[in-house]
Image: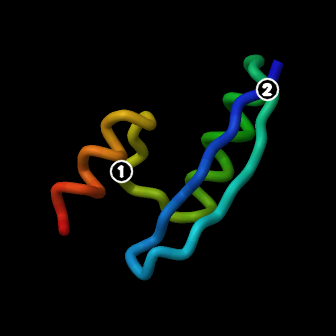
Amino acid sequence: MKFDVCLINRSGKLKHKIFSNSESGFEQLVRWLESQKAREPHTENLSQHLHRSRK
């Protein structure tokens, strides 16, 4: 099994990556988020709410 991650930067540009739903996949996710300088990761429902509330 796998899971998808999408980052949205301040200008609205999307970055998408797929990870294995395993311990090594989670480790890869953390490294990727750090390399992208992602400071506030959120789950889908929370991110949608935060995105809408900023408009």
Give 21 or 48, whichever is nearer the viewer.
48
At mark 1, the secondary structure is loop
Quadrant of res 44: top left
Point 46% across, 71% down: residue: 9
**Quadrant where the image shows the N terminus:** top right
Asked if residue 29 is positioned above or below residue 40 in the image, the reply reads above
Crowding near the residue tagged with mark 2, few <14, some 14–19, many ≥20 C-alpha atoms within 10 Å: few
What's the residue at 74%, 50% (across, down)?
17
Please rate how many residues cluster around mark 1, counting C-alpha atoms within 10 Å: few if below 14, some from 14 to 19, many from 20. Answer: few
Does 22 sit left or right of 7 as displayed? Answer: right
Identify whether 38 is placed above or below 49. below
Left or right: where 49 falls relative to 13: left
Height in image: 12 above or below 36? below
- Nearer-N-terminus badge (2/1): 2
Looking at the rendered structure, the kind of residue marked 1 is: Glu
What is the three-letter code of the residue carrying label 2?
Lys
- Residue drawn at x 69%, y 56% is 16
Image coords of residue 55 (percent x, y): 19, 68
Q: Residue at x 39, y 56 (%)?
A: 39
Q: Quadrant of residue 25?
A: top right
- Residue matched to label 2: 2
- Residue 41, position as x, y percentages in the image: 42, 45
The circle drawn on residue 26 is none
Q: Is residue 46 above or below residue 2?
A: below
Q: Which residue corresponds to mark 1? A: 40
